[in-house]
Structures are given as structure tokens and as C-alpha cells.
Image (spheres, rainbow, N blue to C red):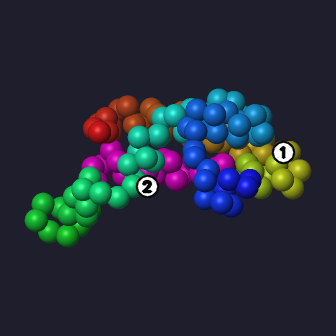
Amino acid sequence: MSRIRQDRYKVSYEKDGQRIDRHLSSSPLFENMLKDNRDLLHSLTHSGKAQLWRRFDGDEVGSGYTDAEVWALLGTVSSAVFMMTCLIAKHYGLDEQLRVATATYMEFAKEREAVKTDFIPAISS
């Protein structure tokens, strides 16, 4: 906790997902989510030339994100909402709600993968 407060915390996509899963008894839910979205999350949090071109659609100001990148971001944000729901349910001892939220997320993740592989092209780095 002190590293977070001192702004010295570095995310470990492998270890942090495992830690969350261990705490929520949801393995490999968040471990896989963080591993699968590492490149996307990394690319969205930094600035530079790669991020500047994303602010243009051709010669016009607009979105330069591909459909695959938008799809991946929406899936990641949805996963974060599920994670917060699970953390709040666990904190307040709402075991049934935690079980339902985890099961719902697992169903969501399975459906998301099926749609992604059928309709969304791979994200290019």
C-alpha cells in the first residue's frame, strides 16, 4: 500500500491477476483478463507519437482507433466493472452476490471470446 501512496507501484500483469484471483477465489479469471489485455492497457496509458496519431481519422480530428481496439477496450472496462462488483461484494460479506457476479463474468467472458474470434480482427501492435 505504501508504494501506491508514494506513486512507486508497478503493475505486474502476471502476479497482480493471480493476487486478485486468490483474494476473490476466482482463478484464473483476472489473471487471464490482465494477461490478455496487457498490450492494450499498456498502449492506452502512455503518450507519444503512437497515441497522437490515434486522435486523427485521416486528415481530420477524430478517432484513429480500430474496431478491434475499441472492442478490446470495452471488454476491459466491462471486466473492471465486474471486478469492482466482486471486490465490493467480498468486502461486505455478500457471498451469494459474489458467487453470482463471478459466474456472470465467466459467462460474459466466454461470450465475448466467441464474438471476438468470429467478428473482430486481431489487434495489431
Query: In which quadrant will I find the C terminus?
Result: top left
Q: Which mark is residue 45?
A: 2
Q: CA distance from mark 2 to mark 1?
A: 35 Å
Q: Position of residue 116 (x, y in %)?
A: 40, 37
Q: What's the amino acid at mark 1?
A: Glu
Q: What's the amino acid at mark 2?
A: Thr
Taking 40 as reference, is 66 left or right?
Answer: left
Callout 1 environment at 10 Å: few (<14), some (14 to 19), or many (20+)? few
Verify whether residue 72 appears in magenta: yes
The earlier-in-sequence mark between 2 and 1 is: 2
Q: Which residues are magenta?
A: 65-84
Q: Which mark is residue 96?
A: 1
Q: Is residue 29 visible?
A: no
In which quarter of the view is residue 64 placed?
bottom left
**Residue at 35%, 32% in the rendered image:** 118
Q: Position of residue 54 (x, y in %)?
A: 26, 58
**Residue at 78%, 45% in the rendered image:** 98
Verify whether residue 21 appears in magenta: no
**Please, is residue 3 above or below residue 95 in the view?**
below
**Residue at 46%, 52% in the rendered image:** 74
Secondary structure of the residue carrying numbered label 1: helix
Disc 2 or disc 1, which is closer to the eye?
Answer: 2
**Please, is residue 57 above or below residue 76 in the view?**
below
Q: Nearer the viewer, residue 17 or 89?
A: 17
